[in-house]
Image (cartoon, grey):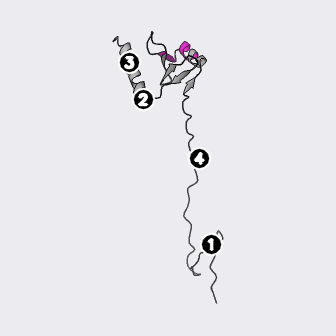
Amino acid sequence: MTAATPASPAGRRWPGRRSGGPVPVEPRREPIRPVDPVPAPAPLVLSPDVMSAALADGTATPLTPIVTSLVRYRDRWWLDAVDEWLQITDPAFAASLDLRRSMSHQGHP
């Protein structure tokens, strides 16, 4: 005669378990939390209309009053490519523009 394997409360069978002992308890699982949404990446290209509006309202500023083809907007540098504005993605070049801009605001050449 073979003893039947007792079933757990969830209907699972526990092989090798003898009747009379404690029923194994499955570990508690934390509820699944929704993942924070990933912020959308900044666009790499802006239209001339967007940049014109930003320059007009003061949220974008050119590198210098003379060098207006390089503009700081939304914590990034942009290059005027005639029909569009391209984001400068090279960190070293962006840092050099920041340095040049800070020097021009201090009255250095």
Q: Are marks 1 and 2 in contact (CB under 8 Å)?
A: no
Front residue of this view, candidates 44 and 83: 83
Question: Around disc 3, counting alpha carbons within 10 Å, would you say few (fewer than 14), some (14 to 19), or many (20 or more)?
Answer: some
Front residue of this view, candidates 2 and 87: 87
Q: Where is mark 3, residue-wise?
A: 100
| Residue 65 on image: x %, y % | 45, 10
Q: The residue under label 3 is which amino acid type?
A: Arg
Residue furthest out toward the front: 82
Count numbered badges in the picture: 4
Q: Where is mark 4, residue-wise?
A: 34
Which quadrant of the figure contains the N terminus? bottom right
Quadrant of residue 47 in the image?
Answer: top right
Question: Around disc 4, counting alpha carbons within 10 Å, would you say few (fewer than 14), some (14 to 19), or many (20 or more)?
Answer: few
SS under mark 2: helix
Which of pointers 2 and 4 indicates the residue nearer the eye?
A: 2
Which of pointers 1 and 3 indicates the residue nearer the eye?
A: 3
Question: Residue at horizontal 55%, vertical 39%?
Answer: 38
Q: Are marks 3 and 4 in contact (CB under 8 Å)?
A: no
| Residue 82 on image: x %, y % | 56, 16
Quadrant of residue 51 in the image?
Answer: top right
CA distance separating discs 4 and 1: 31 Å
Tell me the magenta residue range. Answer: 53-64
| Residue 107 on image: x %, y % | 35, 10
CA distance separating discs 3 and 4: 44 Å
Q: Where is mark 2, residue-wise?
A: 91
Front residue of this view, candidates 44 and 5: 44
CA distance separating discs 2 and 3: 14 Å
Q: The residue under label 4 is which amino acid type?
A: Pro
Q: The residue under label 1 is which amino acid type?
A: Ser
Specify the label residue 8 is tagged with.
1
Which quadrant of the figure contains the C terminus? top left
